[in-house]
Amino acid sequence: MRQVLAGMICVFALTAGAQAKKTLDFYFVDVEGGQATLIVSPSGQSLLVDTGWPGYNNRDAERIGKAAKSAGVKKIDYVLITHYHLDHVGGIQQLIAKLDVGTFVDHGPNRETGKEARELNESYERALATGKHLVVKPGDKIPLKGVDVEIVTADGDVTAKTLPGGGPNSLCPGTKNWPADPSENARSVGFVLTYGKFRFVDLGDLTGRKELALACPENRIGTIDLYLTTHHGFNQSNAEPLVHALKPRVAVMNNGARKGGSPEVWRTVKSSPGLEDIWQVHYSIEGGKENNSNESFIANLAEHNCEGKAIRVEANSDGSFTVINDRNKYSKNYPAR
């Protein structure tokens, strides 16, 4: 009888532990100027946005694997490739050698040509053979359990739908004319993730003209809580009419030591209405001391022999969230509003 009771207590404890996970978790993995964002829903399902660079002795796959282990993730349910550039899809082969992937999500064929594009295509096609494949367009959703993930940009198109909280944008008149971008950056898959009252946006490397298509004359996205600065914080992106209309509470910049972090972007993001803080994956040499955040908010300070620390976020359905710096364990809570 005691053994049965002990077994029942053990099962109850495990069940209670499984049910106790109520947060939506983000791991902004340091891939030194690329992207690899691991998102784990309250249900335990996972979405990895991009795979970082190839080479570097499996550096990026190892760092993604470490984040997955920390999150208790043994398989990636969805890998979303925002666009076909080396710092976003280059690490795909190293990733699938380390972790199983259920479904690959992308905008369809690579529109770029040349040797590098051909090699990336071949590498990605080999990866697709190991799992399911989902091609998305604006308005589609990724069926990640426990959250709503809606595609707002893909393959150069933007959503025709205005999401809740969006509407006419008074910031549009007089905005600068951003140049057309024929590259894969402008074809980035971008999405809005909603968990109750909490909202997050990731637009990959979308460039200014396409950002304006999302923002003007109507803000199609509405306001958000957490903003991943577009294109690693480069000044080819992060158009002010969009950033200021989004009114993020917190921004995370996935820059490298010498990639991204343009001074103009700091000025745009810092002046956005309602912004509380900017957290960075790396100290930006281009940004300098006058632009970089306080060191408490930066995961990696050194240009060389980088430790690869992550910025983590734990979000609640009431809209509150906590940001944690894995380097120094500094954390800050942002209460529900």
Image (spheres, rainbow, N blue to C red):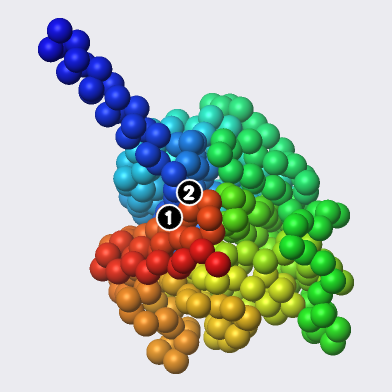
Q: Quadrant of residue 232?
A: bottom right
Please indicate, yes or no, whether residue 330 appears anywhere in the rendered image: yes
Picture residue at 47% right of the left edge, 41% below the top: 42
The foreground one among 119 and 173 is 173
Say if 79 sits above or below 85 in the image: above
Residue toward you, 191 or 2: 2
- Label 1, residues with CA under 10 Å away: few <14, some 14-19, many ≥20: some
Check the image and report above or below for 19 versus 299.
above
The residue depicted at 32 percent of the width and 41 percent of the height is 69
Taking depth in this image into account, of 34 and 67 the one nearest to the observer is 67
Type of amino acid under label 2: Leu
Residue 6: % across, % down: 17, 18
Q: Residue furthest left?
A: 2
Q: Secondary structure at mark 2?
A: strand
Name of the residue lying farthest toward the top? 1
Q: Which residue is mark 2?
A: 24
Q: Is residue 138 above or below residue 177?
A: above
Distance between the Cα atoms at labels 1 and 2?
6 Å
Report the residue at 40% width, 34% height from top: 19
Residue visible at 33% across and 79% down? 295
Horizontal side, residue 201 vs residue 259: left or right: right
- Position of residue 83 in the picture relative to residue 312 (left or right): right
Q: Is residue 268 left or right of residue 63?
A: right
Q: Quadrant of residue 13?
A: top left
Quadrant location of the C terminus in the rendered image? bottom right
- Within-10-Å neighbours for mark 2: few <14, some 14–19, many 20+: many
Q: Residue 313 at x, y = what percent?
A: 43, 58
Camera sees residue 264:
no
Element at label 1? strand
Residue under pointer 1: 314
Three-letter amino acid code of the residue under disc 1 = Glu
Q: Are discs 1 and 2 less than 8 Å apart at CB?
A: yes
